[in-house]
Amino acid sequence: MATKQATMNNGLVYYYGHIQNNDKVVGWVYKGALKQSNMAAFGDSITKGWTGVDYATNPYPALIGSAMGINVVNKGENSGKVVGDTNLDLTYNVDHTKLASYDYATVAYGVNDYFKTETIYSVEETLDRELTAMKKSQP
């Protein structure tokens, strides 16, 4: 949180402040270095916020965003799987998300694969392929 602002003779703007939830980390930072971070949360109904009874007011991706002070786009889908070919699944969502727009991403699927996939090998293979694709698009 910024508490002071200073403009240098050359026009550069600096802010003095502390890290959210940690008043011991303080200092000056150049305005140009400040950027709102973004996170994509890929996953199934648990990521979306399903508790088993109803939907959570604050699913875990929202809690992460609040704790870290970042924007989160929750891409959790009911019945989403690692291995699958629908718009609910990991491959589709990785292919249709501009990953360069995000600084962080989480991937949390698995429950639906456990109940609906022939082999753990197919889950491992697909997950490896999609994580590799994510790394290539956002090093």
Image (cartoon, rainbow, N blue to C red):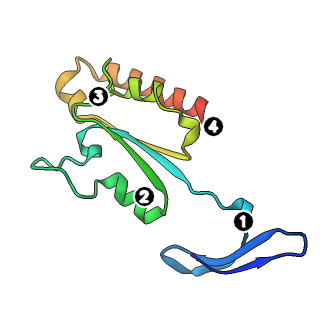
Residue 83 against residue 40 in the figure, above or below: above
Q: Earlier in the sequence, mark 1 or mark 2?
A: 1
Q: Earlier in the sequence, mark 1 or mark 3?
A: 1
Which residue is painted at 12% across and 47% down in the image?
52
Q: Quadrant of the N terminus?
A: bottom right
**Residue that carries the numbered disc 3 in the rendered image:** 81
- Left or right of residue 48: residue 116: left
- Badge 4 marks a residue whose secondary structure is loop
**Residue that carries the numbered disc 2 in the rendered image:** 65
Seen from the viewer's position, the closer of residues 112 and 17 is 17
Q: Which mark is nearer the camera, 1 or 2?
A: 1
User: What is the CA distance from the residue labelled 3 to the residue labelled 4?
Assistant: 24 Å
The answer to whether the residue labelled 1 contacts the one labelled 2, judged by CB atoms less than 8 Å apart, is no
The answer to whether the residue labelled 2 contacts the one labelled 4, judged by CB atoms less than 8 Å apart, is no
- Badge 3 marks a residue whose secondary structure is loop
The amino acid type, in three-letter code, at marker 2 is: Gly
Q: Position of residue 62 (x, y in %)?
A: 36, 56
